[in-house]
Image (tube, rainbow, N blue to C red):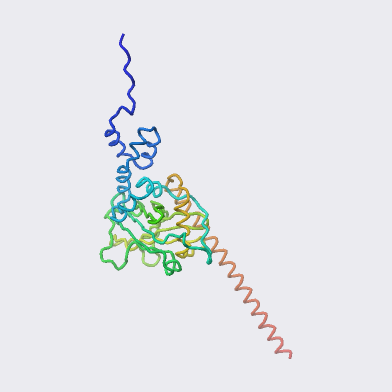
Amino acid sequence: MATASPATTIEDLHPDMLTRVLRHLDGPALAAASCANVHLSSLASQPDLWCDLCLATWPALHHPRLLRLLSFFPNSYRSFFSDAFPSPSPLTVIPPGPGDDEAGLPSELISAVDLQHRGSPILSRVLETDTSTAWFRGAHFRLDALDPKDSSLPTLLAAATPEDLTLNWIFIDPHRRRAVRATSRQPVAIDKHWITGETVVRFATVLGDGCAIGVVATCVEETGQVREVSLTAECVDGVCLSGRDGLAALRAAMEGSRRREEAAEAERRRWEEFSGLRMRRKEAVSRREQMVDLACAAVAAAGFLALFVVTVFR
């Protein structure tokens, strides 16, 4: 009587074969595979797998300094991916007061910026910003990935549509070896500039507590040139945060938890709720100012009338 052959398990496959299969997985799938069993965990933890995955996801990471820096993250490129790929969770930002110690704020930020259209690169840029100066911390929190005076501005493909643009703006703290994705990958709003007629594509992440980080990409429709890619941090009142408060928000986002990947509709809805709240607050401020103006006008009229009566009946 023939005996049944033992069942073949995944551990029986050659490690090289499994590694080739793992190379075809995206980040979340690779992380899930590493939790399946000890054998897959060992294979899926290979640094070169995560290095290739990060470089394919964010081409700006080919910068020599970033290649050196990311290898010193706690778990190398895997740690970087777990920081930069998911969105930061809503958080409570407590900016340092005027007398508080600001040593905990990042003294330098590296931005890895990748603008793509359906996977085709349009812009790949690395920005190194000294954030320790009093000028940066006192001014508005704003970073520009493009110089408008640059003669070689990136150009959209002939058939490119703003809806199909994707953006990755990753902030990296080189001293604490932490990173965070600053904005949504897909646009949350597309508008026309009311003066120039240029297309304004907005990417944004609402961090919570009345704070949002947004990137505006301005495209010239006639030439297809991308004229501006700028990032700002603003509060719910529509006021741009100072560099100091923006750094506090980024520090909280880097140290906070991450949420699972959300659909573009969810990120767009969160931005619309933030924009709606900002509009309502502006309208409330406008109504208060109108009431103050009316009160001042009434007081002035009463004073003028009293003066007139005194003058007439003296």
Residue 238 drawn at (x, y percent): 49, 63
Residue 310 drawn at (x, y percent): 71, 87
Q: Using the rendered view, name the quadrant where residue 193 is placed.
A: bottom left
Q: Residue furthest top?
A: 1
Q: Nearer the viewer, residue 85 or 183?
A: 85
Q: Residue furthest right?
A: 313
Q: Residue at x 38, y 58 (%)?
A: 201
Q: Residue at x 71, y 86 (%)?
A: 309
Instruction: Say left or right for 117 vs 106.
Output: left
- Compared with residue 16, is residue 243 higher up or lower down, i.e. above or below? below
Q: Residue furthest bottom?
A: 314
- Compared with residue 121, is residue 31 higher up or lower down, i.e. above or below? above
Residue 47 drawn at (x, y percent): 32, 43
> Which of the image's four quarters has the N terminus?
top left
Residue 256 drawn at (x, y percent): 47, 50
- Compared with residue 304, is residue 276 higher up or lower down, i.e. above or below? above
Q: Nearer the viewer, residue 224 or 179?
A: 179
> Which of the image's four quarters has the C terminus?
bottom right
